[in-house]
Image (spheres, rainbow, N blue to C red):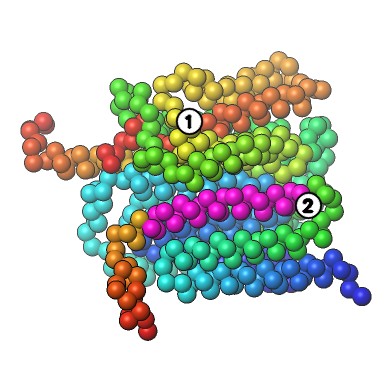
Amino acid sequence: MIGSTFFALAGAGLVGLGLYGVIMRENALHRILAFNILGGGIFLVFGFAARRGAGAGFAADPVPQALVITGVVVAFSATALATAIVVRLAAAQVEERDAAPHAKDDG
Amino acid sequence: MPDPANVVTILALLASVFFFVAGSVGLVRMPDTLTRIHSLTKADNIALGFIVVALLPQVGSVADAAKIVAVWVLVQVSSGAVAQLMGEVALAEQAMTPSRLDQPDHGRSADA
Amino acid sequence: MSVAFDAVLCLLVVLAAIRVVATTDLRAAVGGFLAYGMLLALVWVRLESVDIALTEVAVGSGLTTIVILRAISRMPVAASSSSGSSPTRSARVAVGLTCAVVTLGLSGVLLALPDPAPSIAPYVAQNMPATALGNPIAGVLMVFRAMDTVLETVVVLLALIGVWAMVPQHRLAEVPGPLAPGRAPEPVVFLARALVPFGLLFGAYQMWAGADVPGGKFQGAAVLASMGLLLMMAGVVTAPAATNVRLRALLLVGPILFLAVGVAGWPLAGAFLGYPAGLEKPVIIAVEVASTISIALALVMLVLGPPAGSASS
């Protein structure tokens, strides 16, 4: 099982990299990419645990695998929603800036 | 006498590695996007074909072999269309910047 | 020999991730992310998790990259005003050190995991014959942890509702913006004609075969969704509006059937999401087919985004 240890270390590395990207990147979409990398690293940790749990005729423990599949789909849904929010926010900022010179006192 | 199936596999794999390396060298060394697309699609498709040839002797049944060949056919179709799309975009980008070939001596005087 | 391959593969994945995080150009980051996703799928195959590889390459890498690219093209041009100064060197070092500590700590924990590893695989193997399924992951997803899968289908729907909520109520009837401006180029139309029949077959097969071999409804739905998106890109199919009644009905049929099966499990099988004895396979198939349709449509609409594009581009 020594080969899969590399994958565990890669997962830990991806978690660190994704965390760095989420904190340091200014562009919101870039942050979402880093968030996906962070998620990928966590899934790799699950996959490592699944591989170590091989037994009873399975090459990898099925339960963590099912959890990762659920996680990948949910991460995609979150990414889609997050990008929609980011785009809407940017559009709202542009509208607000364009309306500023003629802004009446709306209170 | 080594197993002929393994010999075919190893030879085909070596050939495909050669073509993949050639395609990547072309990607790095070619001057502009259009020629790079050319090198990528041609060399990489042949290399993929060699990988298919390498896998065929190792496969157990005709159905599995047909599936592997089908993968190659589908990659050909889609990579050809995608290369066309990229070529259109690259051509449009190039049309906006003057090309070396537009000069009277076809840019030869600028060659290093 | 395979250890060397694993080591090189991990190195490539980490390098691709570094490329994504370290570059300042967003499009270069997206390209790196696509490469990272493909390599990650290979890692999953090496970890003997083919189902995850299929999901990762279709949903985690393919659809996610499309969503980000679409967001990049829909961002209003003048909106990106860089917020003040770029982070100072000391901030960068501090955050980098924190992340390095996280990575090292996680690596230490992972290398010190108990041996022999605890595993639920024996319990799964024990109970699989009762599920009439051949794929243990399908067994876990549809029988042992069916609650997670119900909630997962609902989460996808909720994300879609959130995306649709980006526009005010009176604009909900507008059609989402096109995937690419102008007329569809010839190669795209050719791709739609050549690939879509195969893609629909593959998607349906993946859903069907997922009961016994690696596959499943999420993987099949992702393939079906990309075929739908290809058709829209080629101009063959127009994107439906959010208020389209048939769209809403098809989006709901999966979660509602799943929940109905779950509630019916109380009287018929004694537990929520219990399947009546002897009827497991037909019920699972019915739920999977309905869910595949709903999830595929939801994935398509998630990629298309809010109605009429909320950004004026």
Q: Is the same chain shared between marks 1 and 2?
A: no
Place residue C11 in its image quadrant. bottom right
Q: Label 1 crowding class (10 Å Cα cut-off): few <14, some 14-19, many 20+?
A: few
Is B68 in the magenta?
yes
**In this view of the protein, can residue B33 be seen by the observer?**
yes
Q: Is residue C254 left or right of residue B49?
A: left
Magenta part, dominant SS: helix
Q: Residue C95's x, y, as percent?
A: 39, 65
Q: Amino acid at mark 2?
A: Ala
Residue tagged 1 = C237
Front in this rendered view, residue C222 or C40: C222
Q: Is residue B7 left or right of residue C46?
A: right
Place residue C113 in its image quadrant. bottom right
Tell me the distance, in whole angstroms, between the alpha carbons under discs 1 and 2: 35 Å
- What's the mark number on residue B65? 2
Start-end of magenta stretch: B64-91
Front in this rendered view, residue C91 or A79: A79
Q: Residue B37's x, y, as percent?
A: 49, 62
Chain containing the residue with disc 1 = C
Q: Is residue C130 left or right of residue C99?
A: right
Looking at the image, which residue is at 36% across and 23% down? C173
Looking at the image, which residue is at 57% across and 25% down? C255
Q: Amino acid at mark 1?
A: Val
Q: Label 2 crowding class (10 Å Cα cut-off): few <14, some 14-19, many 20+?
A: some
